[in-house]
Amino acid sequence: MRIPDGLDPELVARLVETEGGELARKMGIELLELSASHSVARMPVEGNRQVVGLLHGGAHVVLGESLGSLSSAIHAGPGRYAVGIEINATHSRSATEGFVTATCEALVLGRTLCTHEIVMRDDAGSRLSTVRMTNMLRDAR
């Protein structure tokens, strides 16, 4: 995982210690690139399928929210944190095997709100789903 210089040391320590968080670890999410404006991760389809063998729609949302939240936390900076306030997903295609790669791009990086669009693609590069997430930035107490 490429972690950019200048990040909040506490956030970096948490990322390293938890490997991106408990749920991300259980789902096999690999963080490949992290920044406020552009992040990339991937997740295996295997182990994240629904009963009929397709990648679970909720798995798309978990992958998207993981990247959107981390990107917002990076933008928030030391002494601040990000809280998700809105998320939606549109599923366009299904996957039954391989990996899903998510690319997170910032739409808005404001003082109090961040909005990111996260696009999931299969190994062939076909778009599987699009997630949009908005986080509110708060001061730590």
Image (cartoon, rainbow, N blue to C red):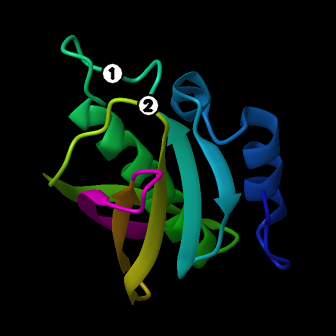
Which SS type dominates the magenta stretch?
strand
Q: Which mark is residue 49?
A: 1
On the image, the x and y values in percent for residue 48 come to 40, 23
In depth, the one of 140 and 36 nearer the eye is 36
Q: Nearer the viewer, residue 90 or 22?
A: 90
The three-letter amino acid code for the residue at tag 1 is: Arg
- Residue 64 point in image, percent of width and height: 38, 53
Tag count in the figure?
2
Q: Is residue 46 magenta?
A: no
Callout 2: 10 Å neighbours few (<14), some, many (20+)? many
| Residue 98 visible from this viewpoint | yes
Quadrant in the picture for the C terminus: bottom right
**Which is nearer the eye, 71 or 45?**
45
Image quadrant for the N terminus? Answer: bottom right
Residue depicted at 33% across the width and 56% down the height: 84
The part of the chain drawn in magenta is 122-141
- The local crowd at label 1, few if under 14, some if 14 to 19, many if 20 or more residues have their Cα within 10 Å, is some
Q: Indicate whether 115 appears above or below 122.
A: below
Q: Are marks 1 and 2 in contact (CB under 8 Å)?
A: yes
Is 38 placed left or right of 121 in the picture? right
Residue positioned 55% across, 77% down in the render: 38
Q: How far across and how far down the image is residue 124, in percent? A: 43, 56
Location of mark 2 (residue): 45
Q: Reply yes or no: does residue 135 show up in magenta.
A: yes
Q: Mark 2 belongs to which amino acid?
A: Val
